[in-house]
Amino acid sequence: MVHFIIQILVFASLALSIYMIVFTLERCRSEKRFAFIYCVVAIFVYTLGYFIEISCGSLGGGIIAIKIMYAGGCFMSPLFLFFVADYCEIRVTKKYYQAPLLIVPVLFYTIALTFDHHNLLYSSYSYDPTNPILGMTVEPGPLYLVGAFYPLFCIILSCIILFRSIIKQSRGRRFALILLLVSALAPLIANFSYVALSFFFKTAVAGINFTAFVMILSNFIFFYNVIRSDMFDLAPRAHAITLDLIRDAFIVLDWSMAYTGSNKNAQELFPGLSEYQKGSSILSLEHWPAAITNVMEKVERGEYVMRKYDVSTKRRELEFTLPHKPDKIYSSWQNRIVSEAGTTQGWIILIQDITETITLIRNIEEAHSKLQYFNNNLRRAFSTYLSEDVVEEIVSDPTRLQLGGINRHMTALFTDVKNFTHIAEALKPEQLIDLLNYYLSTMSDIILEQKGTIDKYQGDAIISFFGAPLELEDDALRACIAAIMMKRAEKEANLYIMEKNISPAPLLTRIGINTGEMIVGNMGTQKKMNYTIISNAVNLAARIEGVNKQYGTWILASEATIQETGEHLLVRRLDRIAVVGIQEPVRIYEILETRADASANLQKLAQLFNEAFILFESRKWTEAEQSFKQILELFPEDGPSRLFLDRCVQFQHQPPAPDWDGVFKLTEK
């Protein structure tokens, strides 16, 4: 009975391995799937050998089973290491570790298959047909321990990679990595114990190799973990938060119209868009509108190309209703993502509830009135976010506002008010609204004067960018000048605020600026759209704004921004930092003033600080400490000098490692 139950468990493990291979091949589009499939194949081979061993009933069958098990065992550990390295995205190039690590299992398995030398691994075999579970007994050969300790080496490397990733990941992701760790360590501990007993005592405990039993349990944990945590999620988790900020339904498909990701609003509209739908055709989704698919096919054939606004032009916009929401009218927009060669790489579908606006749109019958209505609404919508001359250029050429995003080199500017939460708590709602309106109007006017575009307001924060919709040759300089002018205007605004007693404390603005490649464009439909920016360069600008809190500064910019401003600004160089969510280190600079308007004191501060900072980067902690002390005697409120003085004192007692690259990793946003 026990024998039969074990056979059932092993067979189930084999079936589960096959299912995982087929499931991954059919549904997964990630490049990481190959490392996973190779690992599963090795697990399948090992489990197959054990199934044959407990089912064969003869010495010859047992020998074949051991050779099959050894094939899986030889390659399972290095292939698991390759899977872990791929999944955790280590920086080492694959060719530098995969080929060397595969040499050992290839050599050892060659020995195992060669009858002239197989006794180097197993000196003798015996089989007890009356006890098929424990029937096969082997005596270790001279090289047995080497072949057994090599998997230990691979698993240790895997565990090191997993531990590093566990530390860096969020709490929700850590559990998946911990399960991976358990599935790796369980059979390793079992096998190591068996090998140690076999080597030192010349026999296993009662001849029992319990590694295979633990391996079965480990397989189930491993496969459950992959399905539960969706390890091959095609919508990158770094972008998931950004997608959820979009208030309309947002769906991403691959080139074959297979579902790869969506935001929460899309999943509420189509409940079938779960993790298990990923990799399946969108046509299999319940209630999916066939009209959307028809439009996508026409777009791919080039039938829907809108070169300028014309109501008679066939557009990629589609109005439809859904059977499970008959009282709602929706509008969808289908954007084809193409490669440089013109082939389809994927689709982005945006679906919006237009129930409240569709009646108004349908009542506009004349073409001229439609165009006038569009222009009037365009002026109203963008007058708050764009300067008047930019709005007029867009109205004169509405094709600038066609739906879709473009990749453009631009500058993003983020602002935030220090301790605004405490200020808001002390005010009544109507007082808070008056204060915000006054503050945001003052700061927004400065951004618009510099031809910037206001993306959105988030409470007291302003998100803006320079370089779109109109391209600017000096977008970085304009953003920096806007930041300086905002700090100047802040002083006058605070005089008014405190004089009128409309705030319990002055409003002090922190600003972060970054320049780089950004996706900018309209999200929505021609009836309702949001002109916005998305990219890692945008996220970096937001992170830099938050870094002001740690350095005691007000305006920080990345090195990419400062390099494009020429000699117009008085700045001082600060650290190379790695901010939360962005691995690539970046040099930050504090913007003090324009060179033309900088006072003598400010210029002296910049000069003294730069000299002290050179000593700091040269690891001359004592000399740097004295220099920063001298600066604080002249400028006692200087935040960066105080920060670096503390570091000098700390590094004199606990110097950084000799191989420290000078990057400070920040753990707070």
Image (tube, rainbow, N blue to C red):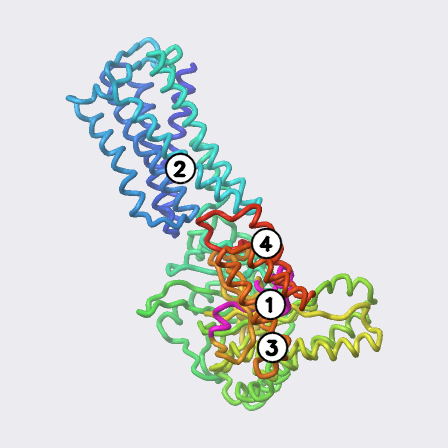
Give the Cα separation between the discs numbered 2 and 3: 51 Å
| Left or right: 13 as drawn, with respect to 623 | left
Query: Percent from the top left, x then y, of residue 589?
Result: 54, 68
Q: Nearer the viewer, mark 1 or mark 2?
A: 2
Residue at 24 percent of width and 34 percent of height: 106
Circle 1: element type: strand
Query: Percent from the top left, x then y, of residue 220?
Result: 45, 32
Q: Which residue is mark 3?
A: 593
Front residue of this view, candidates 637 and 466: 637
Residue ranking furthest to the left: 116
Q: Which residue is mark 2?
A: 157
Give the Cα separation between the discs numbered 1 and 3: 47 Å
Circle 2: element type: helix
Q: Which residues are magenta?
A: 544-563
Query: Percent from the top left, x then y, of residue 533?
Result: 53, 70
Q: Is residue 31 magenta?
A: no
Residue at 67 percent of width and 68 percent of height: 634
Q: Nearer the viewer, mark 1 or mark 4?
A: 4
Q: Which residue is mark 4?
A: 647
Q: Which residue is mark 1?
A: 353
Give the Cα separation between the discs numbered 2 and 4: 34 Å
Labels 2 and 4: the sequence-earlier one:
2
Q: Nearer the viewer, mark 2 or mark 3?
A: 3
